[in-house]
Image (spheres, rainbow, N blue to C red):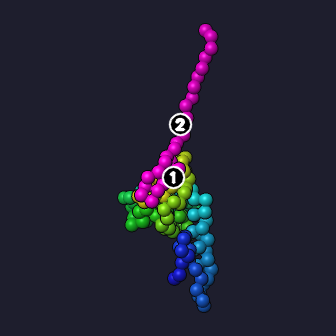
Amino acid sequence: MSETHRLSLPLLQPAQAQKHVTVNEAFARLDGLVNLVLQSVTMATPPAAIIEGAAYGVPSGAVNAWSGHEGQVAIGANGGWVFVTPALGWRAFVQDRGLEAICGPAGWIVGAMTCSAHGAGMKAGVLEVDHVIGAGP
């Protein structure tokens, strides 16, 4: 089956039967990848309840349905998982960390603002501090 170059979306073929299946698969991938929000990039075990459209960065040591898909993005679709290999430079918001991430040569770099092809870059984070200031006796 032919696929698009950047997102590996399935393309329709001439005289293909059940075209709706191919189109629906492409829409499911797009729904999970556009404005990418990863629920986690450290969770190695898939959640017990699959949420449609929820995406996860699959880390090393992944088990069960994610085994063998390390480094890919797992998207909940049709009660199962669709796996997509991210390209260098993809950006995502990592929900459980509350930070942006960039896909680098060795995986997702949480808190990265930039990343070179060799993994060098700049990171930033937010530090919340509560101050109590009193005046007088």
Q: Is residue 11 visible?
A: yes
Of residues 123 and 137, the one nearer the viewer is 123
Q: Position of residue 2 (x, y in %)?
A: 53, 81
At a point 54% along the width and 64% down the height, the residue shown is: 76
In the rendered view, tell whether residue 113 sits above or below residue 132: below
| Residue 134 placement (x, y as % from top left) | 61, 17
Give the residues drawn in magenta, as a range. 111-137
Secondary structure at numbered mark 2? loop
Residue farthest along the bottom direction in this orientation: 15
- Which quadrant holds residue 28? bottom right
Asked whether 104 or 31 is in front, the reply is: 104
Pointer 1: what residue? 114
Amino acid residing under circle 2: Leu
Separation of residues labelled 1 and 2 (CA atoms): 20 Å
Residue at the left extreme of this rendering: 61
- Residue 63, picture quadrant: bottom left
In the rendered structure, does residue 16 fall within the stretch colored magenta? no
Residue 71 percent across, percent down from the top left: 43, 62
What amino acid does circle 1 point to?
Thr
**Circle 1: is it few (<14), some (14-19), or many (20+) Cα within 10 Å?**
some
Mark drawn on residue 70: none
Residue at 39% across / 64% down in the picture? 67
**Residue 84, above or below 131:** below
User: Is residue 99 positioned above or below 83 on the image?
Assistant: above
- Residue in front for this viewpoint, 79 or 109: 109
Q: Picture coordinates of residue 118 (x, y %)?
A: 42, 58
Q: Which mark is residue 127?
A: 2
Nearer the observer: mark 1 or 2; the answer is 1
